[in-house]
Image (cartoon, grey):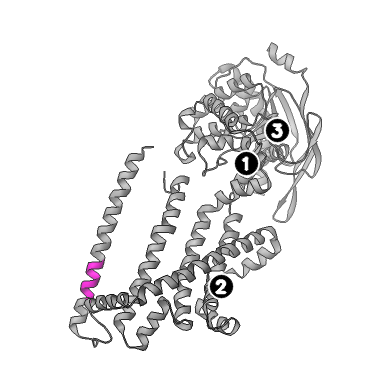
């Protein structure tokens, strides 16, 4: 297995990918500019790319963008950490107590597809119009994904791994730590990526409806002041952060595991 | 020949007493093993052959403690065993290596569990990797190996545990015939060197004739031991050895009616 060849291939691939992405963006902005110049919509409804860039500078300059990003990310990380911890525990309990697991997983389609926004009124009345209310919405939107993926990842481990491990004397925590967890990892990562995307949906929604600071909030302020430039600038920020986190963190993690397992080697 | 005669008077390593096992098949209980009795002497090499689905792998799993019999017992050195343990390590058909570990860590897995210190572990695993001619691949991941190499790692992993008895469940079934012929010789050499007691399950009669001191033929379901053959022939035996043909024909004659019975079962 020649490491060098593989490296060359991927770095070449990365360059191609970047060039393609840049080209795509240039075309997109070009079309946007053309549509703007056709004057179908008034400027206030559809500003030009340049006007949006000006809005960007404005909200960076008055600190509302950096503060919003900071607040949103802190909330998100806190909620997501709780979600992973609790979701994993419940998922493990589902494995341990078979009846409980079976019952809960039979509701999984409903739990997974439940719209995050639908938690907002419940959260406002239960917890209040505050940070904890937002955390609650984010946790409820992502925890089921973690729970169900923990449950199904462990249940779908090929029995031969467990048989082989037991046959070599592994049991209890050692079996769990050295076989169950690593064997479930590729599929657990998929669950975490999905939960992350649900959490990201949820926090923006929750901030639009129940916050006075955060990315979702500056989005709704833009609407209140008919400032489409700010609305689009916020949207671009939200898009960029979602993409960056997935590409730089979750995708990298996924790729590393897949490479180690040889999952990308089709023979 | 002399060696084998002497082995016959050695101590009993493993005893299967009246093993009975039912299967659940579409809600019906099917009798798979109908009272299997088998004595295995220390250092013996036993092959079990039978029509597919006759329960020979189930029997091996019961010896390994991976499945429980409905009745009957397994005695190892005279003591009953009921759970899976490293004194009876298994080489599975395929796919039992851990893809998240390097080759050498796969071999060390059970030793680590047994609490053997780092240095000693490394020494043992290196010895068995060397025996299997895999030293160069110690730091590879399993996907980088061919099927034959993977099975050699699996054998190294099982031997590293220094088991009382080595159980092999069709370990060469997925290999191409050249690789298999090589491994058949290699396994005989390893058996002579390590003096391990081996029970080897296969559906391949020539494999059983090449490897076994005794070949035990299982009947079609409900399975019993139909007949036993003693293969009294010098080692290492080669796949192309003409003199093994007569054993092969005796066994295939015995199995023919069972395979036909099996096919009739499947057509019902």
Q: Secondary structure at mark 1?
A: helix
Q: Earlier in the sequence, mark 1 or mark 2?
A: 2
In magenta segment, residue A30: yes
Q: Secondary structure at mark 2?
A: helix
Residue identified by numbered label 3: B87
- The percent coordinates of residue A121 (x first, y second) are 54, 84
Q: Is A117 situated left or right of B165 in this image?
A: left
State if disc 2 and disc 1 touch (CB < 8 Å). Answer: no
Q: Quadrant of residue A52?
A: bottom left
Residue sitting farthest toward the front: A62
Q: Is B36 situated left or right of B46 in this image?
A: right
Does residue B53 appear in this view?
yes
- The percent coordinates of residue A199 (x first, y second) are 49, 70
Circle 2 residues within 10 Å: few <14, some 14–19, many ≥20: many
- The percent coordinates of residue B264 (x first, y second) are 66, 44
The segment highlighted magenta reads A25-32
Looking at the image, residue A202 lies above or below residue A243: below
The residues bearing labels 1 and 2 have C-alpha atoms spaced at a distance of 38 Å
Q: Chain of mark 2?
A: A
Q: Quadrant of residue A3?
A: top left
Does residue A198 appear in this view?
no
Q: Is A263 situated left or right of A101 in this image?
A: left
Residue identified by numbered label 1: A164
The residues bearing labels 3 and 1 have C-alpha atoms spaced at a distance of 13 Å
The disc at residue A140 is 2
């Amino acid at each position: 297995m020649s490491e060098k060849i593989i490296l060359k291939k991927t770095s070449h691939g990365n360059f191609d990918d970047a060039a393609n992405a840049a080209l795509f963006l240039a075309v997109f902005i070009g079309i946007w500019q053309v549509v703007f110049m056709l004057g179908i919509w008034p400027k206030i409804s559809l500003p030009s790319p340049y006007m949006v860039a000006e809005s960007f500078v404005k909200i960076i300059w008055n600190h509302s963008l950096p503060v919003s990003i900071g607040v949103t990310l802190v909330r998100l990380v806190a909620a997501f950490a709780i979600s992973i911890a609790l979701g994993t525990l419940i998922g493990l309990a589902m494995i341990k107590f078979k009846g409980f697991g079976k019952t809960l997983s039979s509701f999984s389609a409903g739990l997974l597809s439940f719209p995050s926004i639908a938690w907002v009124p419940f959260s406002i009345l239960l917890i209040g119009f505050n940070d904890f209310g937002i955390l609650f919405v984010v946790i409820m939107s992502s925890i089921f994904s973690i729970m169900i993926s923990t449950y199904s990842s462990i249940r779908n481990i090929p029995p031969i791994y467990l048989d082989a491990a037991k046959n070599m004397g592994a049991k209890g925590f050692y079996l769990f730590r050295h076989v169950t967890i690593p064997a479930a990892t590729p599929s657990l990562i998929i669950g975490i990526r999905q939960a992350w995307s649900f959490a990201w949906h949820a926090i923006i929604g929750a901030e639009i409806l129940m916050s006075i600071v955060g990315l979702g909030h500056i989005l709704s302020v833009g609407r209140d002041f008919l400032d489409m430039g700010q609305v689009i600038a916020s949207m671009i920020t939200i898009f960029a952060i979602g993409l960056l986190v997935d590409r730089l963190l979750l995708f990298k993690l996924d790729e590393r595991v897949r490479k180690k397992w040889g999952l990308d080697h089709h023979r | 020949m002399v060696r084998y005669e002497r082995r016959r008077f050695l101590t009993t390593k493993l005893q299967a007493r009246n093993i009975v096992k039912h299967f659940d098949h579409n809600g019906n209980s099917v009798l798979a093993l109908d009272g299997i009795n088998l004595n295995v002497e220390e250092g013996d090499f036993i092959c079990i052959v039978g029509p597919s689905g006759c329960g020979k792998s189930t029997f091996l799993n019961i010896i390994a403690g991976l499945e429980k019999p409905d009745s009957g017992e397994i005695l190892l050195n005279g003591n009953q065993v009921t759970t899976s343990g490293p004194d009876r390590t298994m080489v599975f058909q395929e796919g039992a290596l851990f893809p998240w570990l390097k080759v050498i860590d796969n071999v060390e897995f059970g030793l680590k569990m047994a609490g053997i210190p780092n240095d000693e572990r490394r020494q043992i695993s290196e010895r068995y990797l060397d025996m299997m001619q895999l030293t160069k691949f110690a730091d590879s991941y399993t996907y980088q190996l061919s099927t034959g190499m993977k099975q050699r790692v699996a054998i190294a992993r099982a031997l590293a545990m220094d088991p009382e008895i080595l159980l092999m469940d069709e370990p060469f079934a997925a290999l191409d015939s050249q690789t298999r012929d090589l491994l058949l010789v290699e396994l005989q050499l390893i058996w002579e060197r390590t003096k391990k007691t081996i029970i080897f399950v296969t559906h391949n009669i020539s494999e059983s004739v090449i490897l076994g001191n005794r070949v035990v033929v299982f009947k079609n379901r409900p399975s019993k031991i139909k007949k036993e053959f003693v293969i009294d022939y010098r080692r290492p035996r080669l796949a192309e050895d003409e003199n093994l043909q007569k054993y092969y024909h005796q066994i295939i004659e015995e199995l023919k009616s069972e395979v036909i019975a099996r096919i009739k079962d499947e057509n019902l």
